[in-house]
Amino acid sequence: MLERQRGTAGAFHARPFPEPPRTAVWWFDVERPAVVLGSRQGTDLLDRTACVGLEVARRRSGGGIVLLVPGDVLWVDVLVPADAGWTDDVRASMCRLGEVWVAALAAVGVTEGVTVHRGGVEGGAWAERVCFAGIGPGEVLLDGRKLVGISQRRTRAGARFQCAVHHRYDPARTVSLLAAPLPSGSLPGVATVPARLAGPLVAALVAALGTAGDVAGDVAGDVAGGLAGDMDGETRGVVGSRRVDGGGKWG
């Protein structure tokens, strides 16, 4: 089942697992800019003055902060019930979802240079503060740059994988939200996909998960229509540092 909602970051993070538990894809659109802390991070990490006007929320999964600006980030949660047959191994389940994302990206023409990170958590001091400065198991890279960020929270009902893909990324603004002292050096680069591919990418993700038949009619029609248009070559945009056409050719 695909559900798309608009609201605050805090409300979305607080949303409970559905009853009865079922496989679902939740597509969230934030209505205002927000900075989301990882479960182990405190607000002392933030520069209070720089964060004026931003919603400050916390997710129950780990990792660093994520800056959510309307239109700049595709935020999708994938819910898998405990009895769905996925492994209880946390790393293996992350990698499995990473492969699902790779299949979805391929369906919209993003194929070359796409890999799933299968090792442990990598990243220096910046990774302890900023989510997209580090790389974890199952996360998807494009030419070595993080493209799909994934965090996971498990309950008795199942696993909730929280995923983010940037359409635009402003490292300077992210850094400006952090309190001093800051780590040395600069934030690593991040790969992006154009916003016009958001709908087709979510549709492809649902299909790759095998839940396409549960998608509500209106949403399915809108998303599938966008997918067909993009795959006909009508969409052109920048993916990471390279250009991709609807047919999947790199220029």
Image: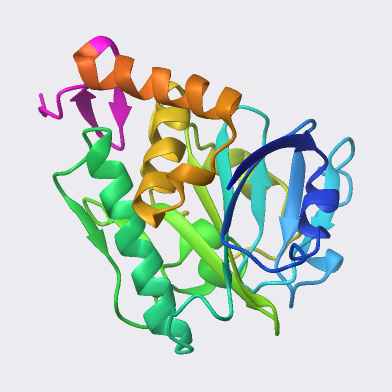
* Whether residue 96 is situated above or below residue 111 in the rendered picture: below
> At x 43% / y 37%, what residue is drawn?
203
Image coords of residue 109 (percent x, y): 21, 33
Q: Which residues are magenta?
A: 234-251
Image coords of residue 88 (percent x, y): 49, 89
Q: Is residue 112 left or right of residue 76?
A: left
* Whether residue 237 is situated above or below residue 129 in the rendered picture: above
Q: Is residue 142 magenta?
A: no
> At x 31% / y 37%, what residue is drawn?
240
* Whether residue 3 is situated above or below residue 42 in the rendered picture: above
Scheme of colours in the image: rainbow
* Whether residue 40 is situated above or below residue 33 in the rendered picture: below
Image coords of residue 45 (percent x, y): 77, 65
Q: Is residue 73 left or right of residue 153?
A: left
Residue situated in front as seen by the camera: 236 or 88: 88
Residue 65 placement: quadrant: bottom right
> At x 47% / y 26%, what residue is drawn?
223
> At x 13% / y 44%, what residue is drawn?
112
